[in-house]
Image (cartoon, rainbow, N blue to C red):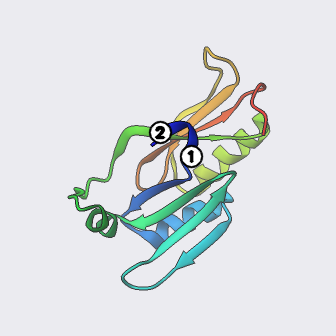
């Protein structure tokens, strides 16, 4: 495989409560791209730029991947970064996340590398970094 001719196109979150997580991400403003409520294969997909954010039941993801996923509520080993087009958009998104019961882990601040960022955890504790940087072009 030539890594230069590949692209990360999906980010799939294994979730415990698909309906609750759909309410959260739709409430943040993500637009549903595709979804299925078929009992043995439910999912929700959101398109964000060239990436699809997919929500899939954790137990089905484990079965499909042939692994055991402990039903741990915390995922702090990675963060998902979402670049936004302005500092105001960042502030607005953090306000929405608060209203949707996200846990704000770091209010907006100016990191050493420039720009502005903040962190929150969604209702199932997936860690998100919201970033605005004046040098990032959409």
Picture coordinates of residue 74, whole percent (x, y): 33, 47
**Residue under the image location 24 percent in, 57 percent down:** 69
Q: Which mark is residue 109?
A: none
Mark nearest the camera among 2 and 1 is 1
Q: Quadrant of residue 67?
A: bottom left
Q: Is residue 124 above or below residue 117?
A: below
Q: Nearer the viewer, residue 55 or 101?
A: 55
**Residue under the image location 48 percent in, 83 percent down:** 37
Badge 1: residue crowd in 10 Å (few <14, some 14–19, many ≥20)? few
Horizontal arrangement in the rendering, residue 98 relative to residue 57 (left or right): right
Horizontal arrangement in the rendering, residue 107 relative to residue 76 (left or right): right
| Location of mark 1 (residue) | 7
Q: Which mark is residue 79?
A: 2
Q: Nearer the viewer, residue 52 or 20?
A: 52
For the C terminus, give its image quadrant: top right
Picture coordinates of residue 51, whole percent (x, y): 61, 52
For the N terminus, give its image quadrant: top left
Picture coordinates of residue 34, whole percent (x, y): 60, 73
Q: Is residue 87 above or below residue 43?
A: above
Q: Nearer the viewer, residue 100 or 61?
A: 61
Check if mark 2's residue and mark 1's residue have beta carbons within 8 Å.
Answer: no
Residue at the front extreme, as displayed: 1
Horizontal arrangement in the rendering, residue 100 relative to residue 42 (left or right): right
**Residue under the image location 44 percent in, 77 percent down:** 42
**For numbered disc 1, what is the local secondary structure?**
loop
**For numbered disc 2, what is the local secondary structure?**
strand
Compute the Cα span from label 2 to label 1. Answer: 19 Å
Badge 2: residue crowd in 10 Å (few <14, some 14–19, many ≥20)? some
Horizontal arrangement in the rendering, residue 78 relative to residue 94 (left or right): left
**Residue under the image location 56 percent in, 37 percent down:** 4
Q: Quadrant of residue 114?
A: top right
């Amino acid at each position: 495989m030539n890594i230069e001719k590949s692209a990360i196109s999906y980010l799939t979150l294994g979730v415990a409560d698909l309906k609750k997580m759909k309410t959260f991400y739709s409430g943040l403003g993500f637009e549903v791209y595709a979804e299925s409520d078929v009992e043995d294969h439910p999912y929700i997909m959101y398109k964000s730029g060239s990436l699809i954010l997919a929500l899939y039941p954790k137990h089905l993801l484990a079965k499909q991947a042939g692994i055991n996923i402990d039903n741990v509520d915390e995922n702090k080993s990675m963060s998902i970064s979402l670049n936004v087009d302005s500092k105001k958009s960042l502030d607005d998104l953090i306000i929405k996340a608060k209203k949707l019961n996200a846990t704000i882990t770091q209010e907006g601040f100016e990191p050493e590398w420039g720009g502005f960022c903040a962190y929150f955890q969604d209702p199932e504790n997936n860690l998100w970094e919201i970033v605005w940087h004046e040098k990032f072009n959409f």
